Amino acid sequence: MASIATTADGRLSLSWQWIARALSWPVAAIAVIAHTSGGHPGFSSQALLCAGLIGALTVLAIGYVRPRELPVIQLILLRIYLAMGFPVFFAPRMHTALGSLRLSSRALDLATLGALAFTCSVVITALLVRRGARRIGRDVSKFLDRQGEYDGRDTIAARILAAVSIAIYLIIASSPGGQKVFGSFGYVATLLGGPAISLGLLFWDMEQRGNYVSRLLFWLALLLLTLAGLSTGMLGAALEPGIDTVIFLWAVRGRLPILMVVGAVVVLIGLNQAKHVYRSLSWRATQSVSLLQRAENWTIAVQQTYSGNASMAIEASADSATSRLSTLLAVAQIFEWVPARFSHAGAKAWLEMPLQYVPRLLWPEKPSPVKEFNNRYTTTFQLQTYRGTQGATFNLPSVGDGYWRLGWLGIFLEGIFLGLLAGLYGGMATPSSRALIILGTGFLFSTGPECYVLNVLGSQPQYWIAMAAILLLAQNLPALFSGAPKTKLVRERPRAPLRVFK
């Protein structure tokens, strides 16, 4: 009977994949047409076509994703599209510290063409690397995953480590200095407190145990981390726990929780405009603000934002969210000014990347990549004054960084670097490996087209050390709890793929 059910499920799964793949091609064609015919008139037909092709590649990648596959390539392409393709529907207005900047049609054309070249480099490299990464994944899984039956000792270890991770996250989120609370270990603490670690351990426990307590703990942790992220005033921190959960559900169960995805979009658009009021209430306070006061500040912020014309507030919020995600115009400015005003910077900063692998604890005077890349970028291109960089700064976009360094060769190299990482993490992960699912999910929040790729490459050793340390603890800590019940789990029946969209 089980074999018949498995065969039936396999046929249903194949039909869903076939439908998704068949529909992705006409949708991709519609995306190209929509961009070329509906894009803003401030962009030329060439720029609109390049943006449409980026959108088409993203649609095809999403259409060909398999259930129970870590969608690393798909989510990276989606971020590239939102940053470099979708902005062609809005007016090309660039604002700097000196005022509004007018960009030429040529710069916009080159920026979208560079984004398309970058996207193709990422896709081709990731697909080539992914197959070989599966063999690497098997070895990594043997090293980081607990082999054998999952029992009560594993549950205790997972909950202890998740509690420690959540505590670190709450300390960082509730403190004005954030990472500075942990001194030289601030970045490592941020990695250990990332929602991918705590939610990943609790999600795996929920999947393996399947009882009421494990489910309750996971969803309470998700709620707590979301509220803590919201209290920081950064919507990315508020959305990260929910996005992690969506990735876990898809990579392990093969199900896409549509309500959670829609809810994330609603939160992003609905609160994006209100966050400015919240920040003025919470960040500029002379005294420390408690979590309860932060919740009250969000209530005040939402009331002030939507007390007047709600439709105009929503429209302004959507425009603000779009401009926040967009890096297309920043890249176009680099094409406008290089080499007309500034010559190519060369690969010197890239060649110094191995210095980033030296721990700052051993070398306190180590050069800061933020100063070399972000601060130098914003002051050179007049996005900020030097004094302005002492507070917050803008990220140097990948495409812009590549062109500023080495011209078109730099763009392709940045795409290859990102493709190597995307193919590695996407190819390694399997639904049966807790460690690889957590590793890949955490990686997705450490990279993107809005940040120069070499910053991600430079942080990989620290990322691996921190993540491997806690995953090895999750593997070996259960040995300390010899008195815990060694319950043997009852395997769940295969889920029908007809419930993919729920």
Image (cartoon, grey):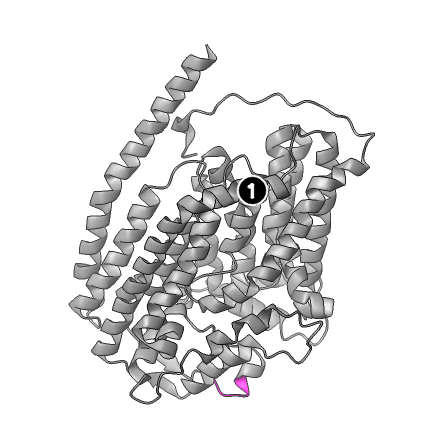
Q: Position of residue 245 (x, y in %)?
A: 53, 44
Magenta segment, principal secondary structure? loop
Viewer-nearest residue: 412 or 271: 412
Residue drawn at (54%, 80%) of the image: 371
Viewer-nearest residue: 1 or 172: 1
Residue drawn at (28%, 38%) of the image: 21
Please state if 133 lies on the left or on the right of 124 as rendered: right
Viewer-nearest residue: 492 or 296: 492
Up-down relation of residue 224 to residue 318 (above or below): above
Up-down relation of residue 336 to residue 281 (above or below): below
Q: Position of residue 20 (x, y in %)?
A: 30, 37
Residue drawn at (70%, 57%) of the image: 168
**10 Å neighbourhood of mark 1: few (<14), some, or many (≥20)?**
few
- Find residue 15 and report its image quarter: top left
Bounds of the magenta span?
A: 384-388
Point out the image quarter for the C terminus.
Answer: top left
Query: What SS does tag 1 mark?
Result: helix
Q: Position of residue 204 (x, y in %)?
A: 61, 37
| Residue holding disc 1 | 139
Q: Position of residue 126 (x, y in %)?
A: 38, 52
Count the marks: how many? Answer: 1
Residue drawn at (45%, 41%) of the image: 259
Up-down relation of residue 223 to residue 205 (above or below): below
Please state if 8 lies on the left or on the right of 458 as rendered: left
Is residue 188 located in the magenta-colored stretch of the structure? no
- Please identify the residue farthest to the top as the structure is shown: 1
**What residue type is disc 1 on?**
Asp
